């Protein structure tokens, strides 16, 4: 029985290991590159910049001025002095394009600590609070307590220092002063900061081998609706356009993909998760879009019915196809957009999930141009949304597809492009399946063997 259980555990572990991403494995500790990631609380975080140390060290033609500075540390029983050369953390973050005024916290990832951040600090603690080097600090051998060296005060000769990312340093315990001779690079990049006061014990927080800094922003993005007041007709289609200004441009798309839409009068106007309006009856509604604690609103007034049905009219901003595609695209006999001039004659696709056929055209590269009419249909909402998010999705007719637009939605891209692609994670699943079958058959063989010998033992 124990062997059967062991085989089952092996099978389960094999499947988990094959499906999960491999953890980072570091051959040595010294760090050659330093990366900056940005995000809001809860993530995700996006890579902002990554630099090789020679790109930063001015002695090797790098972009940042380096400085020599000493840092004192108290461990609770001993005193250390680190004499270092490097660049200031604030200079590095600003060089990487980080808005320090919007920064809330900093997480430091090190190569010798592979499960999350090694240390996390508020931006105030690392960059704003006054920190010092205490050259007159030592430990009394008799009392094992902090004491001023040669009398006087622990604050005698204290120097205010800035937080540094050290390229090379010389860490010495029980040192009587600085030592900038023969510094080593084996701790690169080392986070060094001064003490708020002599008794602050932060020795272990002076992180070595830093390879990434995660910047968390405290602010919220600014949402601005392009039109604050709309006048629309019953039956018309309209997509509300919202401009996003996040603390970093890398976060703009993340914010757009996580907007929450609502209408305070769904009897008159409904809004879906993408900002598409469904105009139902006369009246007025306030459509609001939110992200976290920030929001923007549009007042929608409904009066009368649209000419020509759901296509809308030019007097109230036009139908969805016209607004999205900058005037619409050529139509086929069903009134559906047929793609653009370079993609050939419009065709009709097979029905998808019971919906009526939609128009598309195909160029020589196998790129399908889908009409904006398709984008407006409720039955295609999830599929179209995955395309707008640049995700891989599965279509019942086309199979696996990798998707993209010609440009951002607010730029009025003319069409949605879908490239038929062989895409997937079959090697991972195939490997997991093979290991699972191996374990299954191995367990069965073991079971048969023990049964033939009179049964299995616990």
Image (cartoon, rainbow, N blue to C red):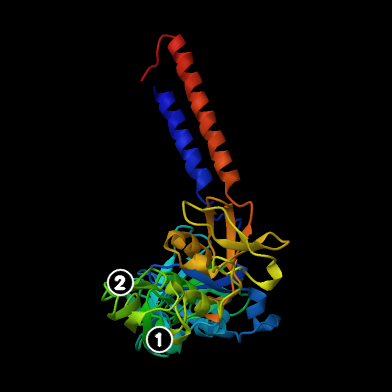
Left or right side of 325 for 366:
right
Q: Give how far across and how far down residue 356 sits, in percent.
A: 49, 57
- Name which residue lies at 63% across and 56% down: 420
Does dot 1 land on a helix, a strand or a loop? helix
Instruction: Point out the image quarter for the C terminus.
Output: top left
Disc 2 target residue: 143
Does dot 2 land on a helix, a strand or a loop? loop
Kindly tell me whether residue 137 is visible in this rendering.
no
User: How crowded is the residue under tag 2: few (<14 C-alpha within 10 Å), some, or many (20+)?
Assistant: few
- Name which residue lies at 66% across and 84% down: 58
Q: Is residue 62 above or below residue 350?
A: below
Left or right side of 451 for 391:
right
Q: Give how far across and how far down residue 97 sits, in percent.
A: 54, 83
- Snapshot quadrant of residue 269: bottom left
Disc 1 target residue: 128
Instruction: Point out the image quarter for the N terminus.
Output: top left
- Name which residue lies at 49% across and 40% down: 15
User: How crowded is the residue under tag 1: few (<14 C-alpha within 10 Å), some, or many (20+)?
Assistant: few
> What whole-number distance in Å separates the C-alpha atoms at marks 1 and 2?
34 Å
Left or right side of 119 for 339:
right
Q: Give how far across and how far down residue 296 sits, in percent.
A: 35, 82
């Amino acid at each position: 029985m124990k062997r059967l259980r062991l085989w089952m555990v092996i099978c389960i572990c094999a499947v988990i290991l094959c499906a999960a991403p491999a953890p980072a494995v570091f051959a040595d500790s010294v760090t050659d590159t330093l990366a900056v990631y940005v995000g809001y609380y809860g993530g995700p975080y996006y890579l902002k910049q990554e630099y090789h140390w020679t790109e930063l060290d001015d002695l090797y033609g790098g972009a940042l001025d380096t400085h020599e500075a000493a840092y004192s540390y108290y461990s609770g029983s001993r005193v250390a002095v680190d004499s270092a050369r490097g660049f200031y953390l604030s200079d590095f973050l600003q060089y990487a394009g980080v808005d320090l005024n919007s920064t809330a916290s900093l997480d430091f990832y090190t190569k010798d600590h592979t499960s999350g951040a090694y240390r996390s600090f508020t931006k105030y603690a690392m960059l704003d609070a006054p920190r010092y080097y205490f050259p007159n600090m030592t430990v009394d051998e008799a009392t094992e307590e902090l004491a001023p060296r040669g009398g006087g005060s622990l604050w005698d000769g204290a120097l205010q220092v800035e937080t540094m990312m050290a390229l090379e340093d010389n860490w010495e315990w029980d040192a009587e002063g600085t030592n900038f001779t023969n510094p080593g690079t084996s701790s690169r990049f080392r986070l060094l900061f001064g003490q708020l006061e002599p008794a602050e014990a932060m020795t272990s927080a002076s992180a070595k081998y830093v390879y990434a800094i995660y910047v968390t922003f405290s602010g919220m993005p600014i949402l601005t609706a392009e039109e604050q007041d709309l006048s629309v007709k019953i039956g018309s289609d309209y997509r509300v356009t919202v401009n996003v200004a996040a603390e970093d441009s890398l976060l703009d798309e993340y914010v757009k993909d996580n907007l929450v839409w609502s209408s305070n009068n769904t009897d008159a106007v409904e809004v879906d998760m993408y900002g598409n309006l469904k105009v139902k009856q006369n009246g007025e509604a306030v459509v609001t879009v939110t992200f976290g604690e920030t929001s923007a609103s549009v007042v929608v007034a409904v009066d009368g019915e649209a000419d020509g049905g759901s296509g809308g009219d030019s007097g109230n901003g036009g139908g969805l196809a016209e607004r999205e595609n900058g005037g619409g695209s050529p139509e086929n006999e069903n009134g559906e957009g047929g793609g653009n001039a370079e993609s050939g004659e419009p065709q009709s696709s097979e029905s998808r999930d019971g919906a009526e056929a939609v128009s598309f055209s195909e160029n020589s590269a196998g790129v399908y141009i889908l009409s904006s009419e398709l984008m407006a249909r409720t039955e295609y909402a999830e599929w179209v949304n995955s395309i707008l998010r640049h995700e891989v999705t599965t279509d019942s007719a086309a199979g696996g597809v990798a998707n993209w637009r010609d440009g951002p939605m607010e730029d009025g891209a003319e069409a949605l492009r879908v490239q038929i692609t062989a895409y997937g994670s079959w090697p991972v699943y195939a490997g997991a399946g093979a290991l699972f079958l191996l374990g299954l058959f191995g367990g069965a063989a073991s079971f048969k063997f023990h049964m033939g010998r009179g049964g299995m033992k616990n």
